[in-house]
Amino acid sequence: IVGTMLLFRWYRTTPDGHYRIDEWILRLPLVGPMTRTFILARVSRGLSVMLKNSIPLDDALSITAQLAANDVYQKHFREMRAQAVDGLPMFPVMAGNPRQFPEQYWLQFRAAEDKSKLKETLNYLGEMYNDEVTTQVEGLTTAIEPILIVFLGGVVGVIVVSVFLPMTTMMNSIGSGS
């Protein structure tokens, strides 16, 4: 077990390992969608703030790639930066990666890019995805509560049995010994 953990930690330090693990995290059933939503909320708000403060788009996209804190998204934002530097629209990168960018997201991004309203739209998307993250976390918490209650009940039951069983056994042996 320890060897497997050490191997996993070593693999995560390699560039390919880090990318593959980030990709795997995004594919997990409950964690993946929540991670994606959290990243989209963070990068949308961050990019919006940078553009509102007149940071050039190529610099803002470089910073946003780091803000994503996920190698898969960093790769996509670097691709978007390359598109922007070449004077091309950025939304095709999003449209080509539907697992990371939902259709609703890139369609709104596309419309904002066409109308030069990227700052406002990204702020709106950031708020919308932030609200969605909050809703997902509350739902997950509500779903986990009964499991935690049953688990804690089991732990308390085991503790009670482990305390009273020796006492009962000792009392029975004293009672039968008289």
Image (cartoon, rainbow, N blue to C red):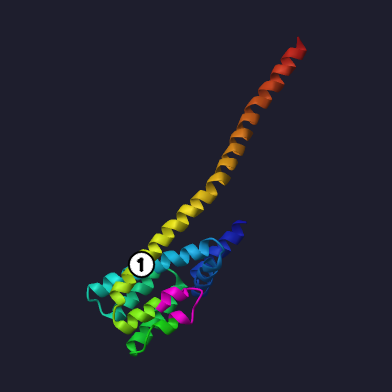
Q: Residue 137: give x, y in percent of width and height.
A: 46, 55
Q: Residue 149: give x, y in percent of width and height.
A: 56, 41
The image quarter in which residue 79 lies: bottom left
Relative side of 7 to 101, left or right: right
Secondary structure found at label 1:
helix
The image quarter in which residue 127 lies: bottom left
Q: Residue furthest left?
A: 54
Relative side of 129 to 158, left or right: left
Residue 47 visible, this orientation? no
Identify which residue is drawn at 70% across, 17% down.
171
**Relative vertical location of residue 178 with respect to residue 60 in this rendering, above or below:** above
Using the image as rendered, state which of residue 6 and residue 148 is in the foreground. 148
Residue 95 visible, this orientation? yes
- Residue 168 within the magenta-colored segment of the rendering: no
In the image, which residues are magenta? 94-107
Relative side of 105 to 8, left or right: left
Identify which residue is drawn at 51% across, 68% down.
26
- Residue 102 within the magenta-colored segment of the rendering: yes
Residue pointed to by mark 1: 126
From the image, which quarter does the N terminus lie in?
Answer: bottom right
Identify which residue is drawn at 52% across, 61% down.
31
